[in-house]
């Protein structure tokens, strides 16, 4: 009988090791930023390749919203964010390689979009969320635009200045959905169909709070010389103090934190919030910086 127990125990250990070995590294889901695409060889394509080289056997899914690369880029400007989230959540739920959990890494606006995925779609579970230049309190200006998209941003600025919170603009312009006007907070809270919702500005959705707190780590990267995001403090969940657009406040000074509407205060005290800085312009970092600062959260 003792021998039988030993054989069973040995089999359990072998199969347990086999399952762990077969599972491999934690998968990674990437969401690109404004004017970019899933597979640009100079941006997301390069990041995907670098991660795959550094973590052999990892499954990396770089999200594409649309049927083509061109559609993916266009949708980063003109496709309702909440509808994008529906598509992404369904895609993640159906991917068999993600069912045991995954890490999320969002670039620029992809950072707050992946945070919305955590809050709205807890299955499959996200383990770590890495937001690289994400604007978690929104933006109040577009000082600069990426590459060939500059003419689009000129039009976006004009549109936002005319009526960021009108229904038609909110429904069809991505950047309007995280446009945060500190001069008229009530207008923002009532008109924003995306950011005001996920930041619990109108009411408290306990599932949003509970789901966000399920993260092991929430990593936020701020670019210290950012010339695109206004204000750059939004990348650490800071923003302008209400009623003006000169002086900023930190996350810890905000009502979002003091009232703990998202559970961020509790996460901060538990050591789940990680604030990293990169000494460069928006999304400008070296492979060395990435490997030293980001890679440890992907293993």
Image (cartoon, rainbow, N blue to C red):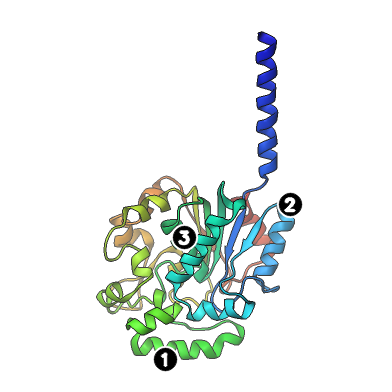
The reply to whether discs 1 and 3 touch (Cβ–Cβ < 8 Å) is no
* Along the line of sight, the residue nearer the viewer: 218 or 152: 152
Task: Look at the numbered discs 3 and 2 and tell me whether their residues touch, using CB distance below 8 Å.
Answer: no
How far apart are the alpha carbons under marks 1 and 3?
30 Å
Element marked by disc 1:
helix
Q: In the depicted view, which residue is nearer to us: 184 or 200?
A: 200
Residue denoted by label 3 = 117
Q: Is residue 115 left or right of residue 60?
A: left
Q: Which mark is residue 244?
A: none
Q: Which mark is residue 158?
A: 1
Residue that appears at 35% across and 90% down? 162
Q: Earlier in the sequence, mark 1 or mark 3?
A: 3
Q: Quadrant of residue 171?
A: bottom left
Q: Please, what secondary structure does the residue beneath circle 3 have?
A: helix
Mark 2, other Cα within 10 Å: few <14 / some 14–19 / many ≥20: few
Confirm whether residue 221 shows in the render: no
Q: Earlier in the sequence, mark 3 or mark 2?
A: 2
- State the image quarter where residue 183 is shown: bottom left
What is the C-alpha distance between the residues marked 3 and 2? 26 Å
Name the residue carrying label 2.
Answer: 56
10 Å crowding of disc 1: few (<14), some (14-19), many (20+): few
Identify which residue is drawn at 63% across, 77% down.
Answer: 68
């Amino acid at each position: 009988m003792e021998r039988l127990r030993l054989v069973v125990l040995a089999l359990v250990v072998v199969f347990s090791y086999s399952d762990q070995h077969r599972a491999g590294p934690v998968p990674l889901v990437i969401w690109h930023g404004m004017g970019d695409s899933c597979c640009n060889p100079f941006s997301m394509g390069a990041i995907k390749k670098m991660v795959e080289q550094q973590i052999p056997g990892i499954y990396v899914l770089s999200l594409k919203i649309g049927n083509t690369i061109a559609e993916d880029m266009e949708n980063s400007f003109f496709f309702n964010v909440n509808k994008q989230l529906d598509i992404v959540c369904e895609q993640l739920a159906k991917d068999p390689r993600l069912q045991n959990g995954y890490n999320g890494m969002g670039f620029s606006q992809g950072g707050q979009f992946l945070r919305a995925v955590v809050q709205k779609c807890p299955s499959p579970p996200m383990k770590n969320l890495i937001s690289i230049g994400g604007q978690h309190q929104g933006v109040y200006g577009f000082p600069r635009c990426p590459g060939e998209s500059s003419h689009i941003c000129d039009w976006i600025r004009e549109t936002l200045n005319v009526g960021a919170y009108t229904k038609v603009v909110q429904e069809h312009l991505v950047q309007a959905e995280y446009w945060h006007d500190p001069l008229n907070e009530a207008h923002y809270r009532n008109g924003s169909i995306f950011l005001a919702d996920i930041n619990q500005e109108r009411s408290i959705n306990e599932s949003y709070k509970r789901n966000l707190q399920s993260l092991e780590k929430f990593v936020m990267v701020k670019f210290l010389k950012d010339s695109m995001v206004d204000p750059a403090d939004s990348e650490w969940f800071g923003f302008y103090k209400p009623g003006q657009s000169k002086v900023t406040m930190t996350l810890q000074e905000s009502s979002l934190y003091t009232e703990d509407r998202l559970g961020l205060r509790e996460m901060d005290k538990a050591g789940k919030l990680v604030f990293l800085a990169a000494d460069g312009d928006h999304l400008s970092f070296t492979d060395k910086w990435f490997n030293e600062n980001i890679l440890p959260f992907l293993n």
